[in-house]
Image (spheres, helix red, strand yellow):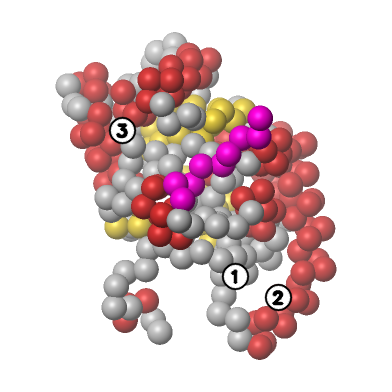
Amino acid sequence: MPKEKYPKPLIFHDGRLAFFPTPSSTLYMFMWLPFSIPLSIYRLFLGTIVYYKWGLALVAYSGITINIKGYSITNPKKISITNKGVLYVCTHRTLLDPVFLSMSLRKPLTTVTYSLSKVSEIMSPIKTMSLTRDREQDRETMQRLLSEGDLVVCPEGTTCREPYLLRFSSLFAELADEIVPVAMNVNVSMFYGTTASGLKCLDSFLFLMNPWPSYNIEVLEKVPKELTCAGGKSPFEVANYIQRELGDALGFECTNITRRDKYMMLAGNEGVVQKKK
């Protein structure tokens, strides 16, 4: 059934297959598997070992399409006018969003996440810090990271596969006046690189198993000072403004649905990766 005929909008769904499993498409998937596994390992190697210098070109040769445009690409030295780092606020499509942004900008970035598997943390080529959900502690962590350099945040707190944006946490708006929104979207043909109830350690691996995955990155204009907290706006106004700007750039619908809502619907929990003591 076409999406426009659904009785209700489909915002969340789980599972790994990104195609309707007809006999022919399923056969094609099994024929592709022997090639996809070593290809995924090779792509992971490129991201973790080669990274900035030759990473973008070699990743493209491996079959990944990266389309990037926007303000920070043509004006890389004009974004920040303070000694603090730039805060990149991204839509969240896969775990690899900050990695592809860092690779595309050819500069080291740090990212924060609400929950991350140990395997993903080890494989990440950029510095990754976990948040605790304690607002004061998370604020201190992010302020410290911003004082050390540029920081990437995904204020939705979790990924969404469909053309919707979840509610943005307002915490990031309290921390920086140099805010650059980044609209990110991905396209896959065979496997989804996200899950709510499955093994999160396989997310990046499965995304990179797709024959021709693509990343579309648009770096928007820096948020004007008068529209930040420094200009008198509340954190909620700033977060909602950036959500609308990113939604317009992507053609996505903005919602008030939260990370907790998603995980309660799909997995019956709040989506926290428990750390082993």
Exactly how many numbered labels are in the figure? 3
Upstream in the sequence, badge 2 or badge 1?
Answer: 1
Horizontally, is 229 left or right of 204 in the view? left
* Residue topped by disc 1: 17
10 Å crowding of disc 1: few (<14), some (14-19), many (20+): some
Q: In which quarter of the image is residue 171?
A: top left
Q: Give the range drawn in magenta.
A: 269-277
Between tags 3 and 2, which lies in front? Answer: 3
Q: How far apart are marks 2 and 1 (CA)?
A: 10 Å
* Residue topped by disc 2: 29
Upstream in the sequence, badge 3 or badge 1?
Answer: 1
x%, y% of residue 226? 20, 25
Horizontally, is 187 left or right of 242 in the view? right
Q: What residue type is labelled 2?
A: Met
Is label 1 in a helix, a strand or a loop? loop
* Residue topped by disc 3: 170
Q: Quadrant of residue 19?
A: bottom right
x%, y% of residue 72? 45, 33
Q: Which amino acid does label 1 sit on?
A: Leu
Whether residue 65 can be seen here = no
Q: Which amino acid does label 3 sit on?
A: Ser
Horizontally, is 79 left or right of 55 in the view? left
* 264, 224: nearer the viewer: 264
CB-based contact (under 8 Å), mark 2 and mark 1: yes
235 is higher (above) or lower (below) than 257: above
Name the residue furthest left. 232
Is label 3 in a helix, a strand or a loop? loop
Upstream in the sequence, badge 3 or badge 2?
Answer: 2
10 Å crowding of disc 2: few (<14), some (14-19), many (20+): some
41 is higher (above) or lower (below) than 191: above
